[in-house]
């Protein structure tokens, strides 16, 4: 779950926040989004699906400011060991993710999760 300060401000229509993160060692990234369930970012969701990302988690909650939030997690399998991404897959996938989100005005900063965060 992304930690939102508010649900009154969105980064793009229907999107409160986006996190691009990988479990250690950091070769295969997932897309984690906090979205507005009443105004879903349909075009972004369709683009992720077209790129081969599959929705692996969907959970809603009410934020402390009473706004509704839908957390969505997406993963894409690679061809490396344990369905991870090979270097060329990582380069292509990260370029596609960057292009998608920069096209709607969201700057992404990929990161590697801490061990505690990744396996909580």
Image: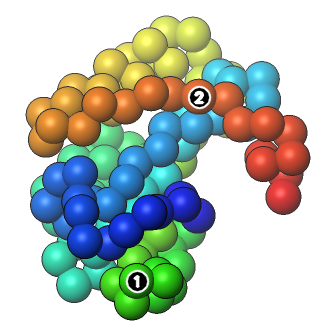
Question: 41 above or below 31?
Answer: below
User: Where the N terminus falls, by quadrant?
Assistant: bottom right
Provide residue 31's location: percent of width, then percent of height.
47, 46
On the picture, is 24 further left or further right than 72?
right
Q: How many numbered markers are drawn?
A: 2
Q: Nearer the viewer, residue 82 or 60?
A: 60
Where disc 1 sits, the SS reads loop
Residue shown at 29% from the left, 31% from the top: 107
Position in image of residue 70 (x %, y %): 41, 76
* Element type where label 2 sits in the image: strand
Q: Where is residue 82 drawn, in percent x and y?
A: 76, 35
Other residues around mark 1 within 10 Å, as few (<14) / some (14–19) / many (≥20): few
Instruction: Residue 74: tell me if it is visible.
Output: no
Of the image marks 2 and 1, the number of the one nearer the N terminus: 1
Residue at the disc numbered 1 = 65
> Front-most of 19 and 95?
19
Q: Can residue 75 be seen in this view?
A: yes
Disc 2 to disc 1, C-alpha distance: 28 Å
Query: Could you tell me which residue is drawn at 54 percent across and 42 percent down?
Result: 30
Q: Is residue 44 above or below residue 57?
A: above
Q: Mark 2 points at which residue?
A: 111
């Amino acid at each position: 779950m992304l930690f939102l300060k508010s649900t009154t401000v969105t980064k793009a229509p229907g999107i409160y926040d986006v996190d691009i993160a990988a479990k250690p060692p950091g070769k295969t990234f997932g897309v984690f989004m906090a979205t507005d369930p009443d105004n879903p970012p349909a075009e972004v969701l369709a683009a992720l699906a077209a790129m081969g990302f599959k929705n692996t988690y969907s959970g809603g909650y009410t934020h402390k400011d009473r706004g509704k939030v839908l957390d969505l997690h997406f993963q894409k399998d690679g061809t490396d060991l344990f369905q991870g991404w090979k270097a060329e897959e990582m380069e292509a996938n990260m370029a596609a993710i960057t292009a998608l989100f920069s096209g709607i005005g969201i700057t992404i900063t990929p990161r590697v999760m801490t061990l505690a965060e990744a396996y909580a």
